[in-house]
Image (spheres, helix red, strand yellow):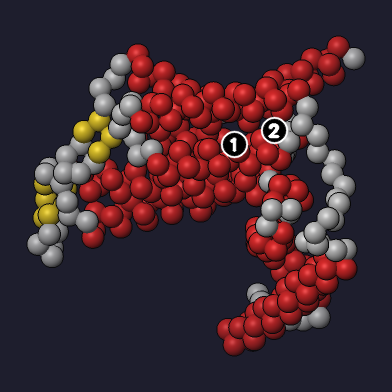
Amino acid sequence: MINRDTFSSCHPIINFLYFALVLVFTMCFMHPICLGISAACAMAYNIYLRGAKGVRFSLMYMLPLMLLAAVTNPAFNHRGVTILTYLPSGNPLTLESILYGIAAAVMLVAVVVWFSCYTQVMTSDKFVYLFGRIIPALSLVLSMTLRFVPRFNAQIKEIAKAQKCVGRSVSDGNIFTRARNGIKIFSIMVTWSLENAVETADSMKSRGYGLPGRTAFSIYRFDKRDRAVLAWLGFCAVYIVIGWVTGGMYFQYYPMLLGVKASPLMVSFMLVYLALCLTPLIMNVKEDRKWHALTSAG
């Protein structure tokens, strides 16, 4: 079962700012604790948003991707002072290269999963609302691009079902028949994509999209809750950046493992970072409890 996301009901600028912060911090912080926090929170939020599909996405796609990225780095990168053994090629296998490969893999998975959450929360109308007046053409192209993959998947399933009804299934017949049917479905899909793009462009042009002085209706209002969440995100961002600048989240892998010593200040930076990444889930759990309390009382 997919849960109702309270965070998605916030103002689009709040949604966009949150994902901008977590994505930038995920790509900049290579400390193992920071990477673990980001990846775990991203997967938890993705599962909350998508339910069983989120679990399947994490297990079937993200874990193999993480293992592949973790194995690739030590196979080609031989830096580090702690030599564990030597590869058949004669190059050393170092502990630092293995740990850096794992860290890079976790970072890659965290970024991909955060983007998966982003596509669920930041719908195309939110993106156009934020950037339609600043960069109208680019915002429309980006909006269409971001929603292309889920629409492509949904449409290709419908086309495959329709073709199966007329005896053109990709699961029946010999390999050549299946390949021919698959090419036919893909051809139909490409034609649909091009026609859809042209229709969208003509529709937006006929409505005067991008013209100077054009007004637009919007259902989004920046209310009291949004101001509170914005203040919270601002506090977290400033506090984490201070920790970053002062070296409170420093960690290096080459030529040897070296990180900042544990201290109350360093722990506070990590806790604030954890609170930032958990912000949507905290909001959702709080609202879910309110809802269950109201339904139980009724």
**Are there few (<14), some (14-19), or many (20+) residues within 10 Å of tag 1?**
many
Using the numbered discs, state the Cα–Cα distance from disc 2 to disc 1 in whole angstroms.
Answer: 10 Å
Q: Residue at x 43, y 54 (%)?
A: 65
Q: Residue at x 43, y 49 (%)?
A: 108
Residue 81 visible within the image: yes
Residues tagged 2 and 1 counted as in contact (Cβ below 8 A):
yes
Tag 1: amino acid: Tyr
Outermost residue, right side: 298
Q: Residue at x 36, y 47 (%)?
A: 104
**Circle 2 — which element?**
helix
Question: Residue 1: image x %, image y %?
Answer: 72, 38
Q: Looking at the rendering, in which quadrant would you find the C terminus?
A: top right
**Are there few (<14), some (14-19), or many (20+) residues within 10 Å of tag 2?**
some
Quarter-wise, where is residue 183 in the image? bottom right
**Circle 1 — which element?**
helix
Q: Is residue 114 left or right of residue 7?
A: left
Q: Nearer the viewer, residue 9 or 81?
A: 9
Residue 197, placed above or below residue 122: below
Question: Residue 208: image x %, image y %?
Answer: 85, 63
Residue 220, placed above or below residue 224: below
Q: Which residue is mark 1?
A: 18
Outermost residue, front side: 213
Residue 51 visible within the image: no
Q: Residue at x 70, y 25 (%)?
A: 227
**Marker disc for residue 7:** 2
Q: Is residue 61 left or right of residue 260?
A: right
Tag 2: amino acid: Phe
Residue 41, placed above or below residue 87: above
Q: Nearer the viewer, mark 2 or mark 1?
A: 1
